[in-house]
Amino acid sequence: MLKKIGICMLFALLLSGCYKTESSGHLKKAALLVPNTINDQVWGTKGYKGLLAIQSRFGADVFYKEKMNSKFIVEQAVKDLQDKGVNLIIGHGSEYAEYFNEISDKYPDIRFVSFNGDATKPNTTSLNFKAKAMGFFGGMVAAEMSQTKQIGVLAAYDWQPEVKGFVEGAVFQDQQVKVDVEYVNGWDDEEKALQLLNRMISNRNDIFYPAGDGFNVPVIERLKEKQLHAIGYVSDQSNLGSTTILTSTIQNVDALYVRAAEKFDKNELESGNLFFDIQDGVITMGQYSPLVKKSFQAEMKKYFQLYKETGKLPDKLKEG
């Protein structure tokens, strides 16, 4: 354990020593807290890329801490980071909003940034993706490509707006399609996710939206074994199989963190909850599989651009 901690500290020092100049503005040093690991290929990795981008943009010392999964552990980490001179801490998940709200009064010189939570204190900010639209477009692709007219959503929680969007997009594209929705009730319960997946496969679902960044990679690997298909989640997951991944709904949280750091450096980052959508350039669609017809890809790109310009999803455009 000591060896592992030593290696992590050395790596953090290497990270912080890559640049000689520091930010000339409000940002001094930045840190990222992740609930699991930065090596998960999806959520943690995206956050880590954002931290590296902040380092590159500002030449600031940066630090990261893994397994930050309780209030006690988080507060111990914050104390350590304060001693290092960190004044921007990003909690890479919705759970950090509650932790930061409870402890932020003790650290008035630190700005706490969380994700998809409810920030209530003057020195806390929550960055939130409006994810319904990306789910809608993912649902359209799934419905178009389904052979069985049965598609599935395997989500982490029932509050995820991308789930509702996916169902609405699928029905818009093909009213004959039925959408099977299951909830893991956790971001990273791989065992439960695979159990639910097996049941959903037995119900003839042939295309899936694994909307949980901690379990979607093993789910996609299982779908690949079964020669079934998926809509990628959070990252462009076409690298997991161009004939398995039909497209991906991408949340560019790394770019969002850089934007927040830029605002903070200028002392312009607002407190409270901030919301971002496709129009803000932080949510995109990924590469399309060669299985998806070029004509349908062109139709999807047209709808995507119209939403970007008007804020109206395809079903509302039809109404207008």
Image: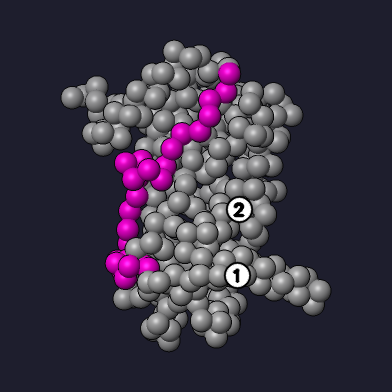
The residue tagged 1 is 16
The residue tagged 2 is 45
Tag shown at residue 76: none
- Residue at 46% from the left image edge and 34% from the top image edge: 285
- Dots 2, 1 in contact, CB < 8 A: no
- Picture coordinates of residue 233 (x, y %)? 53, 40
82 falls in the magenta region: no
- Residue at 18% from the left image edge and 24% from the top image edge: 320
* Front position in the image: 178 or 276: 276
Is residue 225 placed above or below 111 in the rendered structure?
above
Three-letter amino acid code at the position of disc 2: Thr
Mark count: 2
- Picture coordinates of residue 176 (x, y %)? 43, 18
Numbered disc 1: secondary structure: helix
Give me the C-alpha separation between circle 2 and circle 1: 18 Å
Q: Give the class, few, some or many, for how many residues have Cα within 10 Å of label 1's Cα (few <14, many ≥20).
A: some
- Residue at 44% from the left image edge and 16% from the top image edge: 296
State the quadrant of the N terminus: bottom right
Is residue 196 placed above or below 226 in the rendered structure?
below
User: Could one spot residue 151 in this view of the protein?
Assistant: no
Three-letter amino acid code at the position of disc 1: Ser
- Residue at 62% from the left image edge and 70% from the top image edge: 17
Q: Give the class, few, some or many, for how many residues have Cα within 10 Å of label 2's Cα (few <14, many ≥20).
A: some
* Front position in the image: 95 or 157: 95
271 falls in the magenta region: yes
Position of 289 with respect to 114 (left or right) is right
* Quarter of the image where one finds residue 25: bottom left
Magenta stretch, residue numbers = 264-290
